[in-house]
Image (cartoon, grey):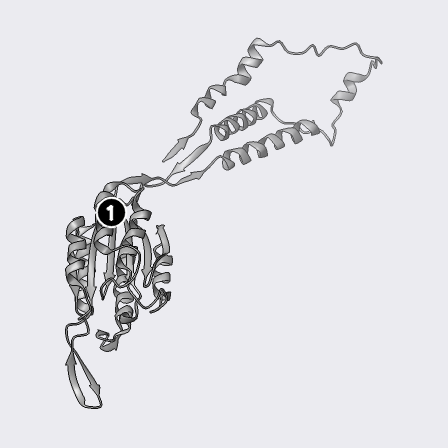
Amino acid sequence: MIEFVWPLVFFCLPLPWLVRWFIPPADATRQAALKAPFLEELQDLPSAHRIATPKHSLLWLAIVAWVLLVTAAARPQWLGEPIELAMSGRDLMLAVDLSGSMDIQDFKLNGKAVDRLTATKAVAGKFIERRAGDRIGLILFGDRAYLQAPLTFDRKTVHTLLEESAIGLAGEKTAIGDAIGLAVKRLRENPENQRILILLSDGANTAGEVQPLQAAELAVKEKLKIYTIGVGSDEMIIRDFFGTRRVNPSEDLDEKTMTALATKTGGQYFRARDTDELDKIYAMLDELEPVEKDKRYYRPRVELFPWPLGMALILAGGLVLVKARE
């Protein structure tokens, strides 16, 4: 549909008629400096430079030009169909363990044995892509916790930064408490229902200045909800000089602490023993923390005033040329 931004401009349409009606015309009678008794005969002679144009035609052209000019001044716009904009109600911070134990190859991806971090990148990357409209942040932790990406709507950049992370980049140990403390610091300014941390680790807290349960108390105070994910299989066959033997590659995983962190803050603890379980966990997180959308609409606008303005200028130029050649 067409809409006028300044419709009151149309009240100017009768302005030329009002000027003509209330303001008297200028006195066109002047005393001639030279009297020529044969002037009337000269005016009756045909001239190649004179164009016989009916006055009423010129009047109608002037009226049309004025109407077009006023229409352009009213700023017509074409309004398109309403487009729904997704406005999220979630700010999610992901905390990923980069300690040396994440190098253990006890996961499979597309039938190929991969380390824990590679599997995490594949599954968490899909999770990030699904959070359209959410703000996502990324914390990487080892000996210390580092903010790799602040909260942002740019999911592609967060995904790229996660893909570029490497084992040992933040150190060989695990500072779970520091990661939680950094998340609290970054999310404390957000509304209470938007403070969510998803923490993934395969070990126990072995570094950092803050103990995990102390950090959890701070998270409770700041209304931060924590979902924890413990990764690593329960059994793995390794070959050595003495043959093959079964080992538990997740014996260092502190499930008790991970469960306590989630329980204290109102979240949940999940156990991922393989890639399929990890994928299901992130799918469950989508259900537990759905993308909330406030329905807002946007109608695209296309400016139309150049068309009537251009036509008015063309008509006005034509009238000037005609009057000049008379």
Residue at position x 22%, y 90% in the image? 241
Left or right of residue 289, residue 48 in this image: right
Left or right of residue 315, residue 1 in this image: left
Left or right of residue 59, residue 272 in this image: left
| Residue nearest the observer in this picture, 221 or 78 | 221
* Placement of 48 over or under 156, stated as above or below: above
Q: Quadrant of residue 120?
A: bottom left
Residue at position x 21%, y 46% in the image? 220
Percent x, y of residue 266: 16, 49
Image quadrant where one finds the N terminus: top left
Left or right of residue 264, residue 28 in this image: right
* Placement of 196 over or under 127, stated as above or below: above
* Placement of 194 over or under 253, stated as above or below: above
Specify the amino acid type for callout 1: Leu
Q: Mark 1: which secondary structure?
A: helix
* Count of all numbered marks drawn on residues in the image: 1
Q: Quadrant of residue 278?
A: bottom left
Image quadrant where one finds the C terminus: top right
| Residue nearest the observer in this picture, 267 or 35 | 267
Percent x, y of residue 194: 25, 45
Percent x, y of residue 277: 16, 66
Percent x, y of residue 41: 78, 19
Residue at position x 20%, y 61% in the image? 229
> Pointer 1: what residue?
218
Q: Quadrant of residue 44?
A: top right
- The crowd level at tag 1 (other Cα within 10 Å; few <14, some 14-19, many 20+) is some
* Placement of 245 over or under 230, stated as above or below: below
